[in-house]
Each structure stands twice: as structure tokens, then as C-alpha cells.
Image (cartoon, rainbow, N blue to C red):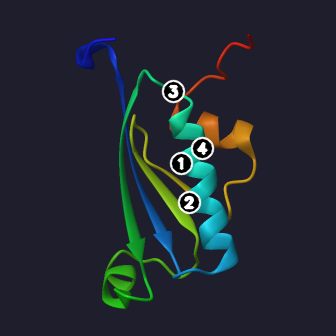
Amino acid sequence: MSDDAKQDVRVRLYLAGDAPNSLVALANLRAVIAEYADVRADVEIVDILTDPERGLRDGVFVTPMLVKFEPSPVRFVLGSLCDRRFLLTVLGLHEPPRE
């Protein structure tokens, strides 16, 4: 698939170090994105324990928090991203066909 045909997904995931929910959220996000060869994902990880000023500046008071920028509209999701179907909807992706 050419890069022009790929769908862009741009997200930022705010984490709190290696807290269990943060690690689960990161794993869930990576697992979903890995299933889609037609997605060009730009994932920024912000650890508010190592960069607390960034969290405050961005208005993050709860982690994990995912902010989806592209495709628009901007969406915010709190929690460990365990609801796969909801995560796909937020990212603007469709369930891949079952083989």
C-alpha cells in the first residue's frame, strides 16, 4: 500500500510512569494500531512523572489520557483503553474483517 493511501492517525497518550493503568493503556493502543497496515500512526507519549509541567500546561489532571488529533474531531479518552470497540471508534478505524 502506498503512503498516500494510508490513513493518518495522530494521538498523544499521557501516562504516569509505569503505573498499571498507564502500561495497559499503552499496550492496548499499540495493539490496536499494529493491526492496521493502512494506518500511519504518529503516537506521542508524555510521562507526566518525568515532565509534570507539560501535564499541567496541557491541562492533564488524570492519567492515562489519550488525545486524538487526527482524524478530526479532537477527542479525549480517559482510562486504560480496554474497550477495543470504543477505541477503534475514537481513532476513526473500523473493525478489520475476520479471516
For label 3, the residue is 36
For label 4, the residue is 31
CA gap, disc 3 and disc 2: 16 Å
Report if the CB atoms under discs 4 and 1 are less than 8 Å apart. yes
How many residues crowd around disc 1 within 10 Å: few (fewer than 14), some, or many (20 or more)? Answer: few
Q: Where is residue 66 in the image (x, y as percent from the top left)?
A: 51, 59
Q: Where is residue 24 in the image (x, y as percent from the top left)?
A: 66, 63
Residue 15 can be seen in this image: yes
Report if the CB atoms under discs 1 and 3 are less than 8 Å apart. no
Type of amino acid under label 2: Leu
Is residue 37 shown left or right of residue 84? left
Relative vertical location of residue 84 with respect to residue 13 in this rendering, above or below: above
How many residues crowd around disc 2 within 10 Å: few (fewer than 14), some, or many (20 or more)? Answer: some
Sequence-first disc among 1 and 3: 1
Disc sitting over residue 63 in the figure = none
Q: In which quarter of the image is the C terminus?
A: top right
Type of amino acid under label 4: Ala
CA gap, disc 2 and disc 4: 8 Å
How many residues crowd around disc 3 within 10 Å: few (fewer than 14), some, or many (20 or more)? Answer: some
For label 1, the residue is 30
Q: Where is residue 64 in the image (x, y as percent from the top left)?
A: 58, 70
Report if the CB atoms under discs 2 and 4 are less than 8 Å apart. no
Sequence-first disc among 3 and 2: 2
What residue is at 75 percent from the left and 47 percent from the top?
83
CA gap, disc 4 and disc 1: 4 Å
Element on which disc 2 rests: helix
Element on which disc 3 rests: loop
Disc sitting over residue 26 in the figure = 2
Type of amino acid under label 1: Arg
